[in-house]
Image (tube, helix red, strand yellow):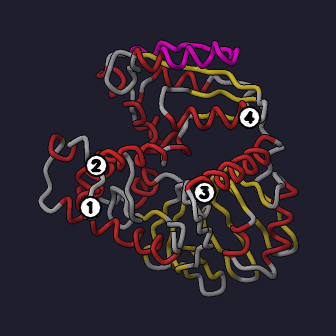
């Protein structure tokens, strides 16, 4: 059973997203977290946690809010004087605070579908990063964001085979913990290595998995014939149930469906796939499914292949920006902002520093 709140005395723990702690899920995981929080640091707690989550802990007169260490869960905040707001959609915060659009960050979002730093497309609204914790002092009625240390998972290997072997065993261990609680799911599969990696994990654990693939008539929802053939071949090879969803919709109709009411319901996610109504309805109507898979957590595999194609000696951050991050050239086609590449490099620098200091 999914439980996201537990209290003991005047202290409590609240989780959004998905959290497995010391192999436990639900109420058992929350009890273990709160028990350990009395004597352990956030760094210690996150070393025993897996998942995509945000965690809120009240210990004494302080409330601590942080996300998973790999920063896959998006949590946003705005602090104005003694007032603050926290939620997992920046649109809702902007609607309340009436924040103005920050054009450079908006362009970055359009080019890469993400923003590397703690910025958002709006001024004074920020994303809570992995190395940060929002702390609210109940007595002082004051909120602030502080830096917190990350665990170092770096390892040294003498041979490539050793690294591959370690990674394989680690993925198997994590997947067994996940599969213990969620056995029935649907994968929206493509021909890409990201979603195929996720499916392989489920097949390894003998999970009950079905495959879905959608086709449409615009650039956002129209899958390729090659992808469709790959997906069909995989479904036949492993005897998996497969459905092809027709989400064909006039692009202008999809855009016009993004009403204010839809934004209140989904936040900025109302614009996913241009708000395609058929696609949204297909998700809304799903029943009796433990999980959905899209391959998103395997996305890291894709830039590695892109990097292989462009890497040379010497290779600078600017080379990486032009060859990988901005390889599509969308930043030139959408609208041009002077110094955009310098901005991206500046955004990258703290992340490169974090990785470098961890030794990985």
Residue 315: horizontal and vertical position, in percent? 27, 62
Closest to the camera, between mark 2 and mark 1, is 1
Left or right placement of residue 277 versus residue 250 in this view: right
Q: Which residue is denoted by mark 1 in the rendering?
A: 313
Q: How far apart are marks 2 and 3 (CA)?
A: 23 Å
Q: Which mark is residue 163?
A: 3
Q: Earlier in the sequence, mark 2 or mark 4?
A: 4
Question: Residue at horizontal 68%, vertical 14%?
Answer: 241
Q: Is mark 3 on a helix, strand or loop?
A: helix
Res 69 → quadrant? bottom right
Instruction: Give coordinates of residue 107: x percent, y percent.
Output: 26, 51
Sequence-wise first label, 3 or 1? 3
**Sooner in the amino-acid sequence: mark 1 or mark 4:** 4
Q: Which residue is drawn at 81% across and 70% down?
A: 34
Which of disc 3 and disc 4 is earlier in sequence?
3
Q: How far apart are marks 2 and 4 (CA)?
A: 33 Å
Residue linked to disc 2:
310
**Viewer-nearest residue: 227 or 60:** 227
Reply yes or no: does residue 231 show up in magenta.
yes
Cβ–Cβ below 8 Å for labels 3 and 1?
Answer: no
Which residue is denoted by mark 4 in the rendering? 204
The magenta stretch spans which residues?
Answer: 229-248
Nearer the camera: disc 2 or disc 4? 2
Residue 139 placement (x, y as % from top left) = 66, 86
Q: Going by the image, does 100 lie left or right of 181?
A: left
Residue 243 visible to the viewer: yes
- Please name which of the two marks, 2 or 3, marks the residue nearer to the observer: 3
Mark 2 vs mark 3: which is more N-terminal? 3
Q: In 3D space, how far apart are the residues under numbered discs 3 and 1 (Cα atoms)?
A: 24 Å
Please say if 208 is above or below 201. above
């Amino acid at each position: 059973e999914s439980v996201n709140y537990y209290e003991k005395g005047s202290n409590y723990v609240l989780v959004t997203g998905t959290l497995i702690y010391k192999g436990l899920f639900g109420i058992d995981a929350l009890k273990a977290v709160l028990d350990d929080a009395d004597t352990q640091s956030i760094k210690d707690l996150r070393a025993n946690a897996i998942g995509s989550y945000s965690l809120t802990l009240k210990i004494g007169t302080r409330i601590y809010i942080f996300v998973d260490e790999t920063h896959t869960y998006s949590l946003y905040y705005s602090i104005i004087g003694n007032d603050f707001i926290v939620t997992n959609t920046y649109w809702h915060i902007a609607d309340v605070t009436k924040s103005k659009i920050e054009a450079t960050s908006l362009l970055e979002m359009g080019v890469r579908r993400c923003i590397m730093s703690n910025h958002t497309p709006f001024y004074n609204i920020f994303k809570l990063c992995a190395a940060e914790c929002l702390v609210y002092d109940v007595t002082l009625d004051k909120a602030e964001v502080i830096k917190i240390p990350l665990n170092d998972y770096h390892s040294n290997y003498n041979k490539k085979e050793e690294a591959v072997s370690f990674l394989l065993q680690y993925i198997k261990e994590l997947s067994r913990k996940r599969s213990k609680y969620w056995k029935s799911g649907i994968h929206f599969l493509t021909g890409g290595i990201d979603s195929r990696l996720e499916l392989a994990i489920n097949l390894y654990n003998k999970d009950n998995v079905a495959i879905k693939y959608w086709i449409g008539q615009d650039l956002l929802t129209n899958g390729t014939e090659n992808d469709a053939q790959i997906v069909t071949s995989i479904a036949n090879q492993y005897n998996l149930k497969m459905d092809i969803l027709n989400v064909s919709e006039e692009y202008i109709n999809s855009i016009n469906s993004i009403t204010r009411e839809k934004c209140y319901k989904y936040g900025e996610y109302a614009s996913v796939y241009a708000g395609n109504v058929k696609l949204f309805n297909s998700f809304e109507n799903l029943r009796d499914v433990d999980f959905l898979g899209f391959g998103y957590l395997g996305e890291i595999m894709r830039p590695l292949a892109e990097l292989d194609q462009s890497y040379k000696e010497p290779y600078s951050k600017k080379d990486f920006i032009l060859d990988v991050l901005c390889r599509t050239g969308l930043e030139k086609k959408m609208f041009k902002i002077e110094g955009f590449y310098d901005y991206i490099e500046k955004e990258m620098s703290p992340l490169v520093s974090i990785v470098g200091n961890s030794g990985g």
